[in-house]
Image (cartoon, grey):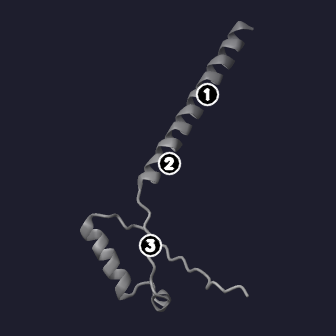
Amino acid sequence: MGVLIAIVAILGGCFVAIVNRVLAHREKMAEIEARRPRVVLQIPESSLAVPSDDLTERILEACRAKGIDADQLDLEVEAPRQLRP
């Protein structure tokens, strides 16, 4: 009976250690992501039809020149705001 309790205690301790390590890793990754700058560019509507236009290429080239890793370019189109009467 004592051996069974020892095995359960060891397995429980390993489980707690693994969960602790996973949570610490997630917290560290969240901290790294929070330090990463988030830049929002407002591109004219006419440029949104062709995502690989000249303006986008110039923006990405300027980012590379400054050493900014622009690995993802997400185009977010906002619906036009309507005035309330």
C-alpha separation, residue under disc 3 versus residue under disc 2: 20 Å
| Vertical arrangement, residue 84 with respect to residue 21, above or below | below
The residue at which mark 3 appears reads as 73
The residue at which mark 2 appears reads as 30
What amino acid is found at the position of numbered circle 1 in the picture?
Answer: Val
Query: Which class describes the residues within 10 Å of circle 1: few (<14), some (14-19), or many (20+)?
Result: few
Q: Reading the chain from its start, which is encountered first: label 1 or label 3?
A: 1
Tell me whether circle 3 and circle 2 mark residues in contact (CB < 8 Å): no
The image position of residue 85, as x and y in percent, is 73, 88
**Circle nearer the viewer, 1 or 2:** 2
Given the current orientation, which residue lies at the most extreme bottom position?
46
Is 53 left or right of 48, judged from the image as shown? Answer: left
Q: Helix, strand or loop at disc 2?
A: helix
What amino acid is found at the position of numbered circle 3 in the picture?
Answer: Leu
| Vertical arrangement, residue 6 with respect to residue 12, above or below | above
The residue at which mark 1 appears reads as 16
Question: Which quadrant, please, contains the N terminus?
Answer: top right
Q: Helix, strand or loop at disc 1?
A: helix
Closer to the camera in the image, 82 or 67:
82
